[in-house]
Amino acid sequence: MCGEQAQSLSRRTMLGVATAALATVALPSVADAATARRRIPLDKISIQLYSLRSLLQNDPEGTLSALADIGYRKVELAGTYGRSATEFRAILDRCHLKASSTHVGIDGDLDKTIADAKILGNSLANVPYANFATIAEWETFAGRLDTAALAFRKAGIQLGYHNHAHEFAPIGGVRPYDVLTAKTDKRTVHLEVDLFWAVTGGADPVQLFRQHFPRVTQYHVKDMTPDGQMTDPGTGVIDFRRVFAASCHTIREFIVEHDQPADPLNTAKVGFEYLRTVRF
């Protein structure tokens, strides 16, 4: 959701999804539909505004108002579409939306980034993307992430990392994701797990949650077609009920997203209705 900055962010689907990934998608749910009792509270449902960047650039207030009409109470930011933090916060307030989370960079003016996040009302922030050719570079980045997280923490904001698929591809036998989690302080750096990209990378989200408990605090909820393409939440083959049943007790936000939606507002509606009604 970086305005019309549609940064490709190397969001490429890795080949080979049909092997390791399928182990986590088409499994039977742990709870049968007839006996499932839990549901996601409305105040934990959010949407990543990257999904609506094509609309927000020209009409931020109309787009955010439409999200509120769908039922959203929270959004996750990744830019303010040419508006200042103060201006964008005013639009959010008029639409009765809270920007509880945001995607940020940590290599620029960190003080301004943190100040803007405070103005916008963010309590959570995530670095949305990083990619390096060597494990040494990933280790250096982990150190920067750790340092930045301490600065955010002093401002009352928790900093984390949002994955794509490449973090699960070994470099010299070592997964960058394992480096990130091992070389950052679990008390200060949380994990925002993008379920589509984790599955694409061959990871099992339930195992990730258990391995890194209680660091996983947010999910990006986007679905996958049988041939590995991205689709709206609840319309594909990822077994979200299995994932949610294993982890819902500590997840703070379930965030709807689609990187290239054909109809952004329809994706927002489909995703909200799925998360509002799913039982597990």
Image (tube, grey):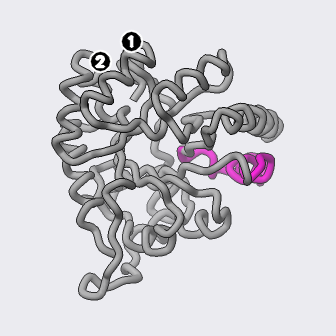
Q: Residue at x 69, y 38 (%)?
A: 153
Q: Is residue 254 left or right of residue 231?
A: right
Secondary structure at badge 1 equals: loop
Q: Is residue 248 magenta?
A: no
Which residue shows up at 62% across the image and 70% down it?
210
Element type where label 2 sits in the image? loop
Instruction: Identify which residue, 126 or 30, lies in the foreground.
Output: 126
Q: Quadrant of the N terminus?
A: top left
Q: Is residue 68 above or below residue 24?
A: above
Q: Residue 70 location in percent, x, y?
A: 18, 45
Three-letter residue code for mark 1? Gly
Q: Position of residue 173 (x, y in %)?
A: 77, 54
Of 206 and 169, nearer the camera is 206
- Disc 2 residue type? Gln
Q: Relative to 54, does residue 231 appear above or below in the rendering?
A: below
The reply to whether the C-beta atoms of the residues labelled 2 and 1 are less than 8 Å apart is: yes
Q: Where does label 1 land, which residue? A: 82
Question: The magenta stretch spans which residues?
Answer: 164-186
Dot placed on the residue nearer the N-terminal end, 2 or 1:
2
Instruction: Identify the residue position indicated by label 2 in the image.
Output: 57
Dot 1: within a 10 Å radius of its alpha carbon, few (fewer than 14), some, or many (20 or more) residues? few
Q: Residue at x 53, y 64 (%)?
A: 250
Does the rendering let one see residue 134? no
Question: How far apart are labels 2 and 1 at the CA level?
Answer: 8 Å
Q: Position of residue 224 (x, y in %)?
A: 35, 55
